[in-house]
Image (cartoon, grey):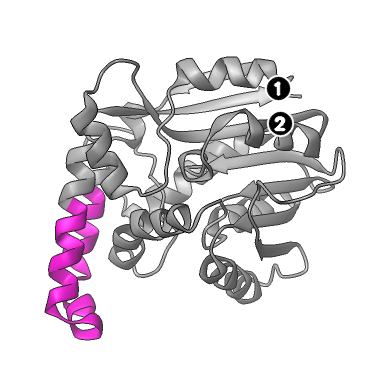
Amino acid sequence: MTDEAVEGADTAAHVRVLATGGRAAHHGWFDAPGDPPTLAEAQDRLTAEVARRLGIGPSGVLLDVGCGDGRPALLVAAETGCTVLGLDLRESAADAARAAAEESGLSGQASFHALDIHRASFPESCADAVLLLEALPDLGGGAQVLARLHHALRPGGRLVVADLFDDPGAHGAEWYERFAAVRPGAVPMGLHELLPQLRRCGFGLLDIEDAQERTGPTLAAQARALDDQADRIAAESGPAALADLRSRQRTLAEVLAGHMHYAVVTAVK
């Protein structure tokens, strides 16, 4: 994985992490239009939806690739009793995840490492479930990653991919240029690309859920969270940093809204 991809992961996460006081930078799950939970509560709901699809129990091992600050994996560990192995491109994310495990009393159930999935070596069938929570574009997508995950997964184990997906032929070159500016090194992927790759790597498809309606309010919730944290961010990082965050937030919203849709894909080895 290139330095550009690592930078891109940091750039994409920066707005959301600071705006939510350092929490995991992923979408939330909203039950209905006007649903009132905070962004943090909605993020935990999305994690619960993902955990339900993983099919993992107390004796299982969850491999979380692109684990970020570790909170989603730790919530799954607390809910199911499973053991977690989390990987992220960024050392800062792995450090934050280890700290979160200590704080939550789950350090005996979870280990987190700064490691590139393209260079990682896994024993065959070492994991009972694999999670890609908004991580696939920053990993470069593609069959190489999926083949490695298939190797690591035990027979009958599940892979859950929750992410924004590109619509084939919906964008011109200008949109892809703007996406690359917001997410350097990331590769947008459509379901029309992911599903054949899953089959070629030996996965069977269990379910596809179109979750755009449930996750769509996230962009507005992120903007509200940024407003709520504005004084803190300005005091800690300065007015220029706050202005930069607002600019990034607007750009993210413009690039993503109406151009990609959120889906949760569940596959089995």
User: Can see residue 174?
Assistant: yes
Label annotation for residue 201: 1
In the rendered image, residue 203, in percent from the top left (x then y), is placed at 71, 20
Is 182 located above or below residue 150 in the figure? below
35 vs 61, left or right, is left
The answer to which of 237 and 218 lies nearer the viewer is: 237
In terms of sequence position, does the residue under pointer 2 or pointer 1 come before the other?
2
In the rendered image, residue 108, in percent from the top left (x then y), is placed at 78, 68
In the rendered image, residue 1, in percent from the top left (x then y), is placed at 56, 51
The C terminus, quarter of image = top right
59 vs 73, left or right, is right
Secondary structure under badge 2? Answer: helix
Estimate how packed mark 2 is, as few (under 14), some (14 to 19) or many (20 or more) residues with alpha carbons within 10 Å.
Answer: some
Q: Give the residue at x 52% y 71%.
A: 92
Provide the residue designation for mark 2.
147
Is 107 located above or below residue 123 in the figure? below
Q: Give the residue at x 45% y 35%.
A: 163
Secondary structure under badge 1? Answer: loop
On whether residue 221 falls in the magenta region, the answer is yes
Give the overall secondary structure of the magenta segment: helix
Q: Give the residue at x 53% y 66%.
A: 93
Magenta-colored span: 220-249
Q: Residue furthest bottom?
A: 235
The answer to which of 151 and 211 lies nearer the viewer is: 151
Q: Amino acid at mark 1?
A: Cys
User: Can see residue 258?
Assistant: no
Say whether marks 2 and 1 touch (CB < 8 Å). yes
Image-quadrant location for residue 74? bottom right
Q: Amino acid at mark 2?
A: Ala
Is 19 located above or below residue 33 in the figure? below
Q: Give the residue at x 66% y 15%.
A: 199
Image-quadrant location for residue 173? top left
